[in-house]
Amino acid sequence: PGEVLASERTVKAVRGFRVEDVGALELKGKARLVHAFRVLDETTTLPERGVPGVRAPLVGRDDEIDLLQSIYGRVANEHRPHLVTLYGDAGVGKSRLTREFLEGIGDRALVLHGRCLPYGEGVTFWPLAEILKAHAGVLDTDPSDIALERIQKAGRDLLTEEVTTDAGRTTAALAFTVGVEDPDYAFARMDPKEVRAEVHAAWRSFFSALATTQAVVVLVEDIHWADPALLDLLEDLAERAVGPLLFLCPSRPELTARRPGWGGGRRNHTAATLDPLTAQESERLVGFLLAIDDLPASVRNRILERAEGNPFFLEEIIRHLIDERFLVHEGGRWRTAVGIEDVEIPDTVQGVLAARIDLLEPDHKRVLQGAAVVGRVFWPGSLHGLTGSVDVDATLAALEARELVLSRLGSSIAGQPEYIFKHILTRDVAYESLPKRERAPAHAAVARWIEETAGAREREFVELLAYHYATAVAESAGAVDDALRRKAFEHLAAASSESRSKQVLKRAERYGEEALRLATDDHERSVALEALGNAFLTDYVGDLAWKYYREAALARAAVAEGSNDPKVAYLSARACEVPVRWPGSMRRPPRAEEVEPLLHLGLSHVPEGDSEERVRLKSIEAGWPFAFPEAPMTEAEGLDRERIGLEAAEMALRLGMHDLASGAYDAAVGYAASRGLYARSRAIEERRLDLLPELGDPLEIGDAYAALAWAGHELGRFEEGLERAEEGLRQVGAMLPSAQVHLVSWESVIRYRLGDWDGALASLDGLRQLLDERRDDPPYFAAHAFAVGGIVAERRGDTVESDRLAGLLLPLAQSFSARLLPWLVILLVERGDLGPAEELLENLPPAWRVHTTCVLEARCEFVAATAAWDEVAALEEEARAYAIASEALSPPIYAERLRGRAALATGEPGRGAETLASATERFRRLGAPYDRAVTQADLARALIAAGRVEGAARILDEADRTFEQLRATKTQEMVRKVRTELEG
């Protein structure tokens, strides 16, 4: 009673009133919360861009408006999302264009608004945080429990079964994104890769839910400052959200340098560029802004020349002339003052802004500079510690009258109006005008104000705190106050952890590096180094992860000074895990003698009884034979390592750490896998599948299935291996690209084995997309799929692609893994490059036994190609012995075919035919159509040589049909030659 409340739309439409934000209200007859404002009194200040009292029409942007309206119409009609990037230099009119477009839409769409903070100051998902908090009615001053309660209520009201299977978890993921943690869902303790997947899914659900009842326009401003993680999420939303959603993203052109592939080739992404206004359009705009008869032509021309078609520059030049009183408003009209013809107009918009700021009264300038320290958006309360006894409210009103700042509808701080610099350039120039000696105390004061305002929600603003405290240290003259340095260090380390938990890895790495530079003792160094190790391992940069974890462990050990410290054990384990568990993340893995001392250091600090540290260290002991196969080890010693791994898995299960148990089972197969004993390793790896319902890390899930796909391939159980790979891909879905890489590489290879060459190449294309920047530099565990691509290309007569892939792979052949090597030998033999193939086989790395199945196949093909028939008997005996030990099906078949070829070549075609007939049937049972067809061609030659031509034609026909289906045109030439022999 006695109050006037107005909706946000009404307040925007009817200017000239001062209002107070009262938050989101539930109103009768309204399905959604309504953002409301209390009308306080009238005001003469008009907070809009343009020259005071004048609102010029949009000039020169008809085509761009038409484009946006057309895209919006298609989005609304087709109910499909679309993303528009609107490029333009600062001041060219991106904000004005978007405002005109949104005003044209009116109430036909729900409009959501977020902005990216300048690079280096930002919080990764700040635009989404603004959107969620506005939707849920959360203020930055709300206590943590109130903020969470409001987000939970918004989730209950919005998220239905149509968009999510678990509304509570989805809401918790949304809250976590903005720094509010639900204690029922411990996202902060989950693997960052899983968190990333859940965050992406949650935001897809959020926007899809909003779009179920009306079209939605999501304005995300200044995405040239966006972190890559936010850009990834925006692309994902545009691709996979459901409903009429238009994401409108104004950006400066530098985004294309930071993200060259942004939106490239996607059907639902449009880019438009705002060029400067033409001379004619600029003159029209000046006419709208300044109806004046006596403006000298020379001055008008200088204005137009300086502005170079930039509307904001034009407006600021005119404001500058007004501030200098060369333009005076009298009797409802503008007139020029004496001396205007001699006025100096700065060359840049920054120069014009600097001139305007210099004209301010000292107190007004101090307030503007203080506001610039806070950021693009600021509140009066944030300035009191920066401006002394200045009347901040009155000063802000004066600055708003000069249109240097604008008041905003609503505020995220209870009881305080919110202001924004009229343009980011204004803020930048104001900040640069602040004397350097004043910057450090100003940033420290702002950081303290954020801490006081945020209270228990400090985690939500940890990146802003890190920025302000670190800047305060960097700008300090002389000796830095140690309390200030500690504050900066603590918030940088926390910001690194926070960024990593959200999979914002480059930022996590940068924060960790800044924290390390500020560390002054071994304890602080170990904290910063651990943060760096975590960030780089999550980023799959294993060489740096190993380096930083190792240094962290040694620094922590120095602090322990001989006493037992479980943290030393933990850090030592994390360091050793990189080369032992994740060698594929490394370019130059350390030698065993470099890793072993760290393992012993960890074991010397491990606590008694069951512990995470003991599980990790035991797992490293178990996985040692796989990581360092060159180390001498008896079978008994190897089986003891297997036992240690199984014990570690049982311990992890007792601790309730299922992901760790899965890793321990994987480590337990280290000895068996290092010897190529895949039946034994498969039996252990299958235990990981029993843990699937409890596994949280998609990388662990993907690895469990990839290990079984790998075992299926090595054992010659191709259908089983393909099923494992495809099921793994279904399980990890699009949660995490790196979890799919190993699976897709085996999918490609096994499809090739089964005769689905087109499918193999399709998988290879998918693999290259997953690898992104490493698409032509694959990690060792995916390189064999590239070799398969080369083999298929060579057999199909595509010499260009065969040459490309051979050239790409040869430099990788001598890596520490032998996975690529046998496949590359087969490719080289197909190409007739026998010299390089021989060199590879003569220089097998220590790890070759891991891939014994493929190495034996490659040796059989090389012996046949070089007619080294005296090696056949020993090679076949080796293949048989290995098959007995490993239960692998294929090596004896390749060896049998080799024996048949040898018999044919050495004048025993009858014996050769008998052997090749047996090999043909065995390849048929194996499910390897290409090898069966090649063996049939050899069999036909043997039958012809033995004078048994009656069956040769039928066998050749079947082989030819197979090659035709595979489009193996080069191999078909072999059939034609044999057919010529038959007909001759």
Image (spheres, helix red, strand yellow):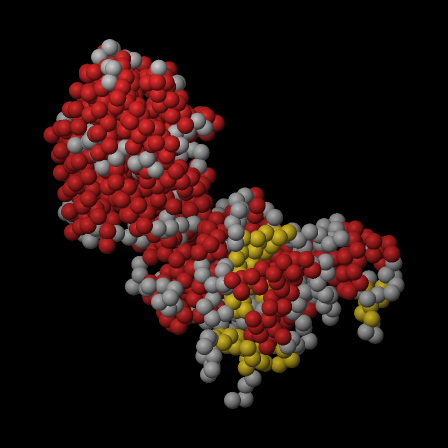
Vertically, is 197 above or below 7?
above
- Furthest residue to the bottom? 1
- Percent x, y for residue 490? 40, 51
The residue closer to the viewer here, 982 or 842, is 982
- Percent x, y for residue 80? 49, 60
Name the residue: 16% across, 32% down: 887
Residue 713 shown left or right of residue 802 in the figure: left
Which quadrant would the C terminus be assigned to in this image?
top left
Name the residue: 35% across, 51% down: 733
- Percent x, y for residue 581? 28, 38
- Percent x, y for residue 257? 57, 43
Vertically, is 473 above or below 128?
above
Residue 374 shown left or right of residue 720 in the figure: right
Let me know if residue 625 appears in the view.
no
Let me know if residue 327 appears in the view.
yes
Q: How many marks?
A: 0
**Which quadrant holds residue 454?**
bottom left
The residue closer to the viewer here, 333 or 767, is 767
Residue 479 shown left or right of residue 979 in the figure: right
Name the residue: 63% across, 75% down: 13
**Which quadrant holds residue 397?**
bottom right
Vertically, is 745 above or below 899?
below
Name the residue: 37% across, 25% down: 971
Vertically, is 733 above or below 839?
below
The residue closer to the viewer here, 845 or 459, is 845
